[in-house]
Amino acid sequence: QVQVVESGGGLVQPGGSLRLSCAASGFTLDYASIGWFRQAPGKEREQVSCISYSDGKIWYRDSVKGRFTTSTDDSKLTVFLQMTSLTPEDTAVYYCAADFSPIPCYNLAYDYWGQGTHVTVSS
């Protein structure tokens, strides 16, 4: 059973950092992609970053480039989203999701979603 579980959210001051984790299980990684999304109050969900295991490519949306970094642990079963220089505009529920289609990870619909983890950036 495919499962992705996020953790690591919390309250952080502007300018601070936070690392989110996405624990993946129940599938092989060969053609998998893991995406990070967020949904701020009153706004549509947007994709923040993603990683394609087939070629190792990582994508970021422009607003987080240089501030957010996606990486994996040695097993590649945990995906991290390291967030730095956080601003109140980064406040949102962050989700990770998995998909197995052989197309660029930023174009995927994503079939499997975690429950989300709250990130609040406030002084």
Image (cartoon, grey):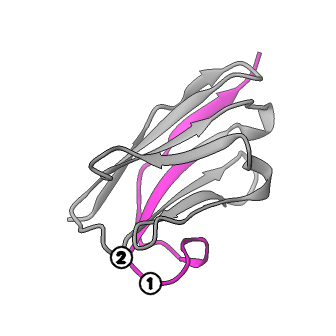
Density class for disc 2 (Cα within 10 Å; few <14, some 14-19, many ≥20) is: some
Question: Which amino acid does the dot numbered 1 rest on?
Answer: Pro
| Boundaries of the magenta span | 94-123
Q: For this view, does 2 lie left or right of residue 42? A: left
| Residue beneath disc 2 | 31
Q: Position of residue 23 (x, y in %)?
A: 33, 47
Q: Secondary structure at mark 1?
A: loop
Disc 1 to disc 2: CB gap under 8 Å: yes
| Residue beneath disc 1 | 102
- Determine the CA span between mark 1 and mark 2: 6 Å
Answer whether residue 56 is magenta in the image: no
Residue depicted at 60% across the width and 44% down the height = 69
- Check the image and report above or below for 31 versus 38: below
From the image, which quarter does the C terminus lie in?
A: top right
Q: Position of residue 113 (x, y in %)?
A: 42, 60
Residues 57 and 19: in front is 57
- Check the image and report above or below for 121 versus 21: above
Residue depicted at 79% across the width and 39% down the height = 89
From the image, which quarter does the N terminus lie in?
A: bottom left
Question: Which amino acid does the dot numbered 2 rest on?
Answer: Tyr
Residue depicted at 46% across the width and 31% down the height = 8
Answer whether residue 111 is magenta in the image: yes
Q: Secondary structure at mark 2?
A: loop
